[in-house]
Image (tube, rainbow, N blue to C red):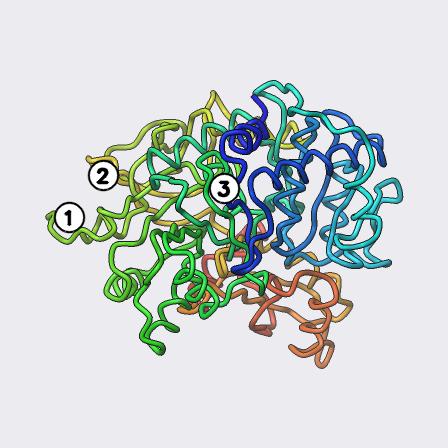
Amino acid sequence: MNLADWLDATARAKPDAPAIFEGTELYATYAGFAARVRALAAGLQAAHDLKAGDRVAVFMKNCPAYLELFYAVWWFGGTIVPINSKLHPREAAWIVGDAGATVLVSDGDGLGADAGMPADCARIAVGSTQWSALFEQGEEDATPARVSGDDIAWLFYTSGTTGRPKGVMLTHWNMRVATLAYALDVDQPAPDQATIYAAPISHGAGIYNFVFVRAGGSHVFPLSRGFDPAEIEALSRHFGQAVMFAAPTMVKRMIEAAKASGYRGEGIRTIVYGGGPMYAADIDEALSLFGPRFVQIYGQGETPMTITSLPRELVADETHPQWRERRASVGQAMSCVEVRIANDGEDVQPGEAGEILVRGATVMKGYWRNENATAETLRDGWLHTGDIGRLDEDGFLTLTDRAKDLIISGGTNIYPREVEEVVARHPGVLEVSVVGQPSAEWGEDVVAFVVPRGEGACDAKVLDAWCRAEMASFKKPKRYVFCAELPKNSYGKVLKTELRRQVA
């Protein structure tokens, strides 16, 4: 089944239902949404000879065109490659090349002339004459293409500890089951609900689009094309029954703004939070101001949004003898997966820590053109998450650590190796090691320990400018610690545990 079948069915059943809003202005009904998708699919095929299985990349901030592009690509049986809009153009260009994308759709000039874009990839800017022309050429297919459940719908690039991003192959079946799990384990969708895209649609917020398309709900794109607490408050009050996905740092910012304005969550139905650690004090304060509007989820790109969930009644509960421990957990396994804790392949006892393993229909098909990484991560039918946690006797999962080097800042994964490779290229740097430092605002900040090539070879200002020119701003270190040498073990491996102890 093609994911675009859901849009087709909703448009036929509820053609006049409001589908997409820009701010509070109606952009398209479901009939109009589907019509634009059909035209865009035909235009892309006619102009660029696209066929089933071809990849189309998108690199831009949230806007209605993003959602239209998703469904247009699926309509003809293609694969969408959403790229985090926060990435540096060179990083985005590498993903475009690795995915073998035929077309890149972006904001304005997109990657720029010096980003190193593959020469054989066509570039289209949303809002340009070329973009508008796509809606006026080609013969439209009345219904979506037939696809196999095993066909790749979404190629999601998530960084790996090797320093280069890996393309997670998510199939139509993966996404379909993940959507059904939302209704069972996260929240009950309904036509009167409005999902607000305040978090990047290239990630978890976008994955939640399916359930609202199927239910015939509204899709709201803030005019800021990002996250602004005052704007979210206004939109929530306007639409009512508002639903959104938010990283813990976004929740914290909303609560800080609410304390100042007196807002108490009016119009918000549900805030689904995940993607990073939520401190107990922060969720306690959020509940005291907004009440039981919060649901927690835990997932990875390799099994998107679908490892565990903690529903609103358990997030808010204070009657159970273990309510504090449960609120600090990430909940129980979702209905679509099995979760176990193991060390060296052997299950541990309840309460003992080990690696989190996941098996189920939402687990990825594998990594794009990377058999070695696939074999390492998918073993004996189980996804090895690299995260450390423990299950209690009631099946509640508590994360005790993450993959040892991963930094999560503002809900976004940052892998130290990527940052280290950039810093190490500076001629004034002899050695570098990057770790995360706890941050009340962002969850973690990036800290770089640097051994310079002699006195005056580099300083924080110089390295900051270097990193800003070479990679996404959110990845660059917020702090540099200059030292004569890095702590190492007898094998010459840097002891990051010691560095983390120092910054803690």
Residue 322 numbered tag: 1
- Residue 59: percent from left, percent from top: 70, 51
Q: Residue at x 45, y 32 (%)?
A: 178
Q: How many marks?
A: 3
In this rendering, the answer to whether 431 lies above or below 40 is: below
Q: Residues within 10 Å of mark 1 (few under 14, many from 20)?
A: few
Of circles 1 and 3, the one toward us is 3
Please, what is the three-letter code of the amino acid marked with disc 3? Ala
Q: Is residue 342 left or right of residue 116?
A: left
Dot 3: element? loop
Secondary structure category for the residue under label 2: loop
The nearer-to-camera label among 3 and 2 is 3
Q: Are marks 2 and 1 in contact (CB under 8 Å)?
A: yes
Label of residue 17 in the image: 3
Dot 3, how many residues are within 10 Å of its Cα: few (below 14), some (14-19), or many (20+)?
Answer: some
Distance, label 3 to label 2, CA atoms, is 45 Å
Residue flagged by tag 1: what amino acid is it? Gln
Q: Residue at x 77, y 45 (%)?
A: 104
Few, some or many residues within 10 Å of mark 2 (<14, 14–19, 20+): some
State the residue position of label 2.
392
In the depicted structure, whether residue 288 falls above or below residue 116: below
Task: In this rendered view, identify the residue nearer to me: 347 or 465.
Answer: 465
> How far across and down, in percent of the image, does residue 10 sit?
51, 32
